[in-house]
Image: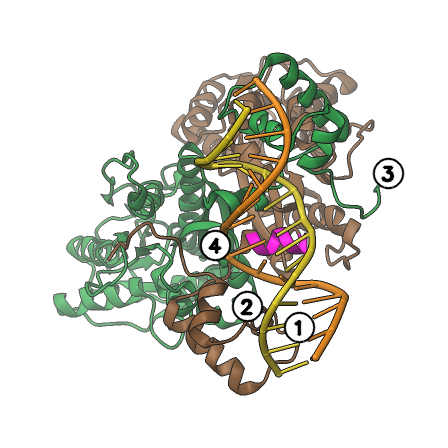
Chain colours: A brown, B green, C orange, D yellow
DNA sequence: CTGAAAGCGCTTACAG
DNA sequence: CTGAAAGCGCTTACAG
């Protein structure tokens, strides 16, 4: 059943079996040129009986068409990346492109060189880099003059690539301010992992918001994005009587932190306010419903793809991003006694 | 900046600029044959100055190698599919393959014919179909004699494709039984959307468990996998005094249903027990922690890929799937008064 | 270590 | 409507 290693049937085989010339087979394949119905039938039958499938490599070679869009995503199942990828796939398919993905650890682009080369070896029109921080010198070199678009997660301005923006900085800044405005003396933070020494952008923005407001900057708790680490960080904070408000690097972390607060015998938001970022679908379903900052990854994915494709003049369907602070039940003024 | 439409530089251009023959350029590219260091340098410089990138189509054509694995996934961001995809990508990359994805609505494989053809036109070793129900006659025809592996989500036995199993049927059956064993008179169900008239396999298994136990079979509430629909279904159930136990088609639906119960002024599990399926990371973090059935999608993804690759004799790293009922805080015996 | 030749499977003018 | 020829960009024997 597995069959031997023999080469699959080619257009020449089909032509022979059907008793026609090679170009004729090609014509029924592409449909670009009229072919007599009888002939067409015979060719179709031959293809079927041989189990013929056109060789895409040969096709791509001769046509010079690049039917693949490369997506360089992260090595995680984080909400935002998942969402962007799904939307890119959908939009790309609609535009007649196939999506090939490579997951990269931004801190270790070096390591994935072979995967990258594999991607670049395909007939790709361009590459969408879902995280601008992945787009370092090494990657830039590999990509050469290939069309690229990327997603910026901060407010950097000197970007030399076509990009769309998911403004993490603004999100973190506003959430922190919301908590401060509620009357909290300061806001604690459970941070996303930092890479290469630099703090995550959401952490930097949180710090800035505190400084700008003249609030003390407490020590940061770091996680590795995992629920487990988030719960540990949350537990430590929950037992600290000084903590009245926690800004979490994303919604998932916030969920975990709320659990820890519950386990510590305290209540959200009566004892401690909690807020996140992302507004993932579950945020509104949690008890208490999570105050968070909505980020529009659906939009970002489609927009980034269209930015890449623009070179090929397609119509935009991305619409306008929907984002902003969403105040729900998990944040409130600090308890009077505190 | 966008640059013209002129063909990108080829190996011939590099050869000319470097003052060597075409095969020599190829040699420094592949590294299969020794080349003098000076020559190598000159070639590298020429490649750089021209912005040369090897044409993967030509390479695939001449080598007859198929460096791509196709993955046919679902048109949703459901936990299981996301997980399987991420694991497949990781394992494939490790084995030197690129992953190309096509998201398909199983009820409408017809519609995505062009996307499928695009995929099949690439140099692919084979295709992993993440949902066996997608693998219908139409798809089977398209795939021809291409290697395929799939993931079975029930207990079907007459499968004619290499497959791994994520036993949804057993999961639903056991969860329902768990609730029954707790003393509930019956178990209500918030179901996943059914396609083509047939109920989802988790729903069928739930029904079977009730029948086997001689329990009455209440009317099903259907969702479209969305949190919103789940909350509505949950609200209807929460207000029904006859409802003491709810089995939800997956964890996300369970979260939403718990929210609805909370809003109805009732408590989980004191008034109503709730259980799901999947055991996604947040299940243990919810308050109350969700009783659920753990399904090992990480394993399934890797295993399905390896099944496909086995034809190429790779080593397995999939390990043993970890699954089973996980009893947490959201289920309890019915209230005595009820 | 390097070059000239052949060929991978297909499509596109070019003729009829 | 159909066939014979050329060529897409690369790699692999084959000679030196």
Residue B136 included in the magenta stretch of the image: no
- Which of the two marks, 2 or 1, is nearer to us in this view? 2
- Which chain is indicated by disc 1? A
Q: Please state if A242 lies on the left or on the right of B264 as rendered.
A: right
Q: Nearer the viewer, residue A308 or B125?
A: B125
In this rendering, which labeled residue sits more in front, label 4 or label 2?
2
Q: Which mark is residue A92?
A: none
Which residue is labeled 2 in the image?
Answer: A22
Q: Nearer the viewer, mark 4 or mark 3?
A: 3
**Is residue A61 shown in magenta?**
yes
Tell me which segment is drawn in magenta: A58-65
**Residue B230 in the image, given as x and y percentages of width and height:** 46, 60
In which image quadrant can residue A251 be found?
A: top right
Q: Which residue is mark 1?
A: A32
Within 10 Å of disc 3 (Cα), the crowding (few <14, some 14-19, many 20+) is: few
Residue A96 lies in quadrant: bottom right
Residue designated by label 3: B1
Whether residue B210 is visible to the viewer of this picture, yes or no, is: yes
Dot 2 falls on a residue whose secondary structure is helix
Tell which tag, 1 or 3, sits nearer the viewer.
Answer: 1
Give the total number of marks visible in the rendering: 4
Q: Is residue B223 above or below residue B89?
A: below
Which residue is identified by label 4? Answer: B263
């Amino acid at each position: 059943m597995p069959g031997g290693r023999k080469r699959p049937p080619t257009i020449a085989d089909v032509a022979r079996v059907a008793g026609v010339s090679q170009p004729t087979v090609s014509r029924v394949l592409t449909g670009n040129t009229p072919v007599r119905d009888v002939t067409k039938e015979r060719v179709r039958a031959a293809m079927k009986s041989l189990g013929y499938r056109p060789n895409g490599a040969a096709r791509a070679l001769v046509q010079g068409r690049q039917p693949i869009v490369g997506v360089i995503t992260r090595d995680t199942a984080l909400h935002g990346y998942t969402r962007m990828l799904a939307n890119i796939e959908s939009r790309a398919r609609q535009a007649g492109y196939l999506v090939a993905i490579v997951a990269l650890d931004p801190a270790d682009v070096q390591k994935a060189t072979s995967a990258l080369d594999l991607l670049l070896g395909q007939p790709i029109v361009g590459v969408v880099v879902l995280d601008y921080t992945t787009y370092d010198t090494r990657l830039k070199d590999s990509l050469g003059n290939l069309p690229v678009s990327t997603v910026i997660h901060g407010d950097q301005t000197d970007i030399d690539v076509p990009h769309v923006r998911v403004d993490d900085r603004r999100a973190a800044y506003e959430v922190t301010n919301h908590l401060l405005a509620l009357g909290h003396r300061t806001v604690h933070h459970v941070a996303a992992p930092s890479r290469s020494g630099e703090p995550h952008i959401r952490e930097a923005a949180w710090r800035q918001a505190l400084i700008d407001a003249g609030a003390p900057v407490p020590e940061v708790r770091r996680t590795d994005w995992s629920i487990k680490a988030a719960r540990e960080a949350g537990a430590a904070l929950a037992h600290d009587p000084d903590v009245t408000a926690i800004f979490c690097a994303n919604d998932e972390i916030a969920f975990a932190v709320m659990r820890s607060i519950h386990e510590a015998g305290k209540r959200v938001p009566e004892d401690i306010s909690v807020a996140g970022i992302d507004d993932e679908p579950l945020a509104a379903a949690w008890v208490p419903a999570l105050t968070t900052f909505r980020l529009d990854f659906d939009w970002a994915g489609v927009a980034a793809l269209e930015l890449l494709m623009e070179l090929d003049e397609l119509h935009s369907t991305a619409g306008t991003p929907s984002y902003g602070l969403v105040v729900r039940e998990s944040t409130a003024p600090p308890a009077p006694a505190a």
